[in-house]
Amino acid sequence: MTFAPALLDALRNARHVVVFTGAGVSAESGIPTFRDALTGLWARFEPSRLATAEAFRADPSLVWGWYQWRRSLVHRAQPNPAHRAIAALAGKVPRLTLVTQNVDDLHERAGSPSVIHLHGQLERPRCFTCQREPEAPLPVPDEPDAGRHVTPPACAHCGGPLRPGVVWFGESLPMNAMDRAFEAAENCDLLISVGTSGVVYPAAEIPQVAWRAGATVLHINPAPGPLHGERDFALASAAGVALPALVEAAFS
Ligand code: OAD
């Protein structure tokens, strides 16, 4: 792959890089995205029946079963070269902040510490009633069926049902994660946005905040959107190809 010299300079000279990831970064690990035609989760499942508090109230075991299926997919998956390139990049620049919309743990398993999870984490369930988290991790299911009903475990404190630790439609993002992500976007020199359709707000604002604050912005996506002028770059490529090649081109 070839890279614009101005992009390589921006990466080599950056004091603070923000990497902002979406479902596309985990696609090559075999985790389905949300909005890719045919393969995306929201092409096959109805969000309002699975990813809202109302859906959980109406049918907790349908919702819990669907998230157990997603946990089991993630558990069987491995980090891909894109996750690993991001972890490696952190060792090559003075400061790197990794912000993800993903609820999987593939960044952590690739060696990225302190990932900011804007949309929660599959492995952080909590009580639907009292919000407490269970003390021990829940066993990982081997759930081959997305539509199977599975009764949520009861909270050890109040007996309420456990819910997935993710942000559902209509819910606010975790305040601390949001503050840290926006603060990093405002104070970075380069933001690399990887594998996101950029349609879910407020997360989708993060690259725009960085760009308005004067940072260079790079989009890595096989189907990138329009660019906004100078300091805005796109690589129309899979993340697992583009990211390792970019790190190699800039630092070897
Ligand atoms: P989407 O499914 O909306 O977008 C995935 C993007 O990844 C698309 O733009 C694809 O073109 C791109 N893509 C696919 N394969 C790729 C690859 N190998 N390398 C790089 N890019 C690739 O997923 P998100 O933008 O993450 O929210 O979706 C945002 C939020 O919408 C999710 O966090 C979730 C969902 O509803 C909540 O659950 C709150």
Image (spheres, rainbow, N blue to C red):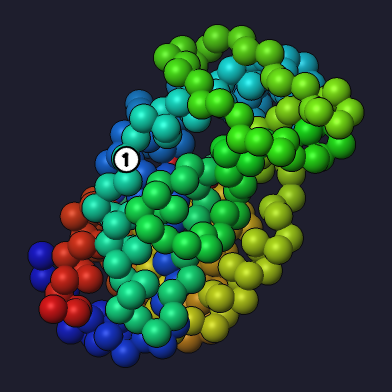
The quadrant of the image that shows the N terminus is: bottom left
Q: Amino acid at mark 1?
A: Gln
Mark 1 = which residue?
Answer: 78
Task: Residue at 35% x, 63% y: name it.
Answer: 87
Task: Residue at 35% x, 81% y: name it.
Answer: 93
Question: Which sits in the foreground, 61 or 45?
Answer: 61
The quadrant of the image that shows the C terminus is: bottom left
Residue 183 shown left or right of residue 191 in the figure: right
Mark 1 within 8 Å of ligand 1, using the beta carbon: no
In the figure, residue 15 lies in which quadrant? bottom left
- Residue 64 lies, in percent from the top left, at 64, 21
Task: Residue at 42% x, 34% y: name it.
Answer: 74
Quick check: 66 above or below 26?
A: above
Residue 131 shown left or right of residue 239 in the figure: right
Residue 217 shown left or right of residue 238 in the figure: right
Q: Is residue 202 in view?
A: yes
In the figure, residue 75 lies in which quadrant? top left
Question: Which sits in the foreground, 36 or 131?
Answer: 131
Residue that sits furthest to the top in the current view = 148
Task: Residue at 61% x, 35% y: name it.
Answer: 137
